[in-house]
Image: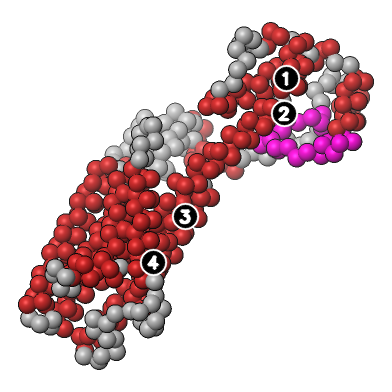
């Protein structure tokens, strides 16, 4: 059962990787090679988890399957972040972030390899194994947490339904990856403290038995499957949506053909290209739009010749068929159809004589502000420099502002002489 699960998962992931890198007749989408590296790394990791492959590689180097599977898992986690960086960041910033993650991956793999070799040389020391697991869990947990936050945030802003559900599925897969990391952390604490809660180097007979295998085997498998399905779902649903759209366009084009022939026979000059009536399947959208526009042009051209009785008969037939209440798009603004409450007419007309005009609007409050009453022509706010100049003592100026100059009758009358 374990061989079938992990080998089948590896084959499915390799098929997804081949689908991403295959030529599509145009420019490859952003992040194609990062996604291919992600799926290939996951496939190799699951292949190394299979007992048959594990026995084959461990016949050469003992216990090396664990190092290979963990290395491929960290590589897949780095490829996931590289894919998101290429989608969400500009090219320079994305390259810089990817370069830092690759350096961190190289350091982590080097440290894991060093502790693995030391563990094998010292007879599988539990302390060295705990250091090995600590490096693996630290990098994997940090990457899964970052990936979970980014996918969930982008799922809230996505407008396409397939992309939104794909990102949410990926977020659930990241949750299972964090569950696996928590299990590994618990195992690390048990090994470091010597509690013996989890048997060291024990094998699983099935995905769920013993109970710890649900976290060590099933959780990473479900996480990889959900992440793969979530990231590939929009790419798989896009051809299906295009196929559905082309089918709808073909049916609409065929349904409009009788009406189009009827109206264009009366007004043939509205047809764009009368000699070319063949429809290409790759250009069906253009032909459908052209047919709708030609029908509308014919309706506008034949409007002066349309009788009222014919129009009423068509409306009655539409009501009988139940299409009269077809919902239509409500316009954002509507032109006023009702007359003005006070139409523009002569002063002595009865309409203005019987309808009083509204009172004039009150003057704004700013018109009676202190600055305007004072007659100041400057409306700028006083700055620090001007405020400082105003506070300094300056000699009395004889020339004043023309609007605030004293009037002759405001000055005191000169005295005739000294008082007696």
C-alpha span from label 2 to label 1? 9 Å
Q: Is residue 219 visible?
A: no
Q: Is residue 374 left or right of residue 342?
A: left
The answer to which of marks 4 and 3 sits earlier in the sequence is 4
Q: Say which residue label 2 marks.
A: 255
Q: How many marks?
A: 4
Q: Is residue 126 magenta?
A: no
The answer to which of marks 3 and 1 sits earlier in the sequence is 3
- Badge nearest the viewer, 4 or 3: 4
Give the class, few, some or many, for how many residues have Cα within 10 Å of label 2's Cα (few <14, many ≥20): few
The numbered mark at residue 260 is: 1
Per the image, label 3 sits on a secondary structure element best described as: helix
Q: Is residue 339 magenta?
A: yes
Q: Say which residue label 3 marks.
A: 166
Q: Quadrant of residue 218?
A: bottom left
Image location of residue 272, percent across then percent down: 62, 12
The numbered mark at residue 5 is: 4
C-alpha span from label 4 to label 3? 23 Å
* Closer to the camera in the image, 397 or 62: 62
């Amino acid at each position: 059962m374990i061989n079938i699960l992990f080998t089948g998962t590896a084959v499915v992931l390799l098929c997804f990787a081949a689908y991403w890198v295959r030529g599509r007749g145009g420019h490859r989408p952003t992040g194609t090679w990062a996604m291919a590296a992600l799926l290939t790394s996951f496939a190799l990791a699951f292949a190394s988890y299979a007992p048959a492959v594990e026995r084959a590689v461990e016949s050469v180097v003992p216990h090396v399957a664990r190092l290979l599977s963990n290395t491929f898992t960290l590589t897949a986690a780095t490829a996931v972040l590289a894919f998101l960086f290429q989608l969400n960041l500009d090219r320079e910033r994305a390259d810089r972030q990817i370069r830092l993650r690759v350096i961190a991956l190289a350091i982590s793999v080097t440290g894991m390899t060093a502790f693995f070799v030391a563990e094998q040389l010292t007879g599988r020391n539990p302390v060295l194994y705990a250091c090995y697991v600590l490096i693996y869990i630290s990098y994997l947990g940090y990457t899964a947490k970052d990936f979970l936050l980014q996918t969930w945030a982008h799922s809230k802003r996505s407008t396409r339904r397939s992309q939104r559900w794909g990102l949410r599925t990926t977020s659930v897969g990241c949750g299972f990856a964090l569950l696996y990391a928590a299990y590994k952390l618990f195992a690390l604490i048990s090994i470091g403290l010597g509690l013996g809660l989890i048997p060291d180097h024990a094998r699983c007979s099935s995905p769920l038995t013993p109970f710890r295998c649900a976290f060590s085997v099933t959780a990473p498998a479900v996480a990889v499957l959900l992440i793969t399905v979530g990231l590939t779902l929009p790419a798989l649903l896009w051809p299906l949506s295009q196929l559905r759209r082309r089918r709808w366009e073909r049916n609409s084009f065929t349904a409009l053909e009788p009406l189009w022939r009827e109206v264009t026979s009366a007004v043939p000059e509205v047809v764009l290209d009368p000699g070319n009536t063949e429809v290409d399947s790759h250009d069906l959208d253009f032909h459908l739009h052209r047919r709708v526009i030609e029908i509308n042009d014919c309706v506008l051209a034949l409007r002066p010749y349309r009788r009222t009785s014919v129009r009423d008969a068509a409306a009655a037939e539409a009501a009988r068929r139940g299409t009269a209440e077809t919902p239509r798009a409500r316009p954002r603004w509507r032109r006023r159809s009702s007359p003005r409450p006070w139409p523009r007419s002569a002063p002595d007309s009865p309409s203005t004589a019987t309808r009083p005009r509204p009172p004039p609007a009150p003057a704004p409050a700013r018109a009676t502000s202190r600055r305007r009453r004072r007659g100041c022509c400057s409306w700028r706010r006083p700055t620090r420099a001007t405020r400082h100049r105003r506070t300094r003592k300056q000699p009395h100026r004889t020339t004043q502002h023309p609007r605030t100059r004293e009037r002759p009758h405001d000055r005191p009358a000169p005295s005739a002489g000294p008082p007696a």
